[in-house]
Amino acid sequence: MEIWINPACSKCRSALSLLDAEGAGYSVRRYLEDVPTVEEIRAVLKRLGLEPWDITRTQEAEAKELGVKDWPRDAAARDRWTEALAAHPKLIQRPIITADDGTAVVGRTEDAVREALSRSSGRS
């Protein structure tokens, strides 16, 4: 199991605390420092079953500068969104937890983190 975090994010810290409390085995990716490639973002979107606009933080200053709220949300625009997430990782919703079963969740709630835990066997 891997968790993409921004250490300054309270939701990320809460998710890490819950994973630790449950004795989960996981690795941490500080995605603002270790920026995911377009291919990695596509792969995690597939695992999430979501589109890039579903995991874009549209209220961030960078998103407003780019005008992403006005971008089309269709198959033809998918690459534009994914490339923007790779170029501006601050726009990626967090935390993202990849489960051992090949799925992933956006772990912003305790229930979502527990869902990832239930899909993973890695206990420390």
Image: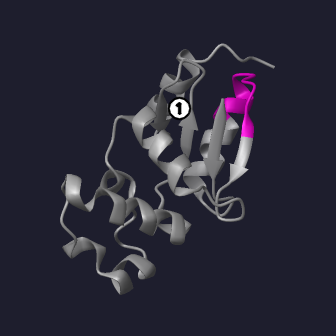
| Structural crowding at the residue carrying mark 1, measured as other residues with C-alpha within 10 Å and reported as few (<14), some (14–19) or many (≥20) | many
Residue 25 position by quadrant: top right
Q: Which residue is drawn at 46% across and 64% down?
A: 85
User: Seen in the image, is 110 located left or right of residue 6?
Assistant: left
Residue at the extreme top? 121
What range of the chain is rendered magenta?
A: 18-27
Q: Can residue 108 be seen in this view?
A: no
Quick one: quadrant of the C terminus?
A: top right
- Type of amino acid under label 1: Val
Q: Is residue 36 above or below residue 23?
A: below
The x and y percentages for residue 20 are: 74, 31
Residue receiving disc 1: 113
Q: Residue at x 38, y 76 (%)?
A: 63
Total tally of numbered discs in the picture:
1
Quick one: quadrant of the N terminus?
A: top right
Q: Which residue is drawn at 46% across and 55% down?
A: 93
User: Seen in the image, is 26 located left or right of residue 82?
Assistant: right
Residue 98 on the magenta span: no
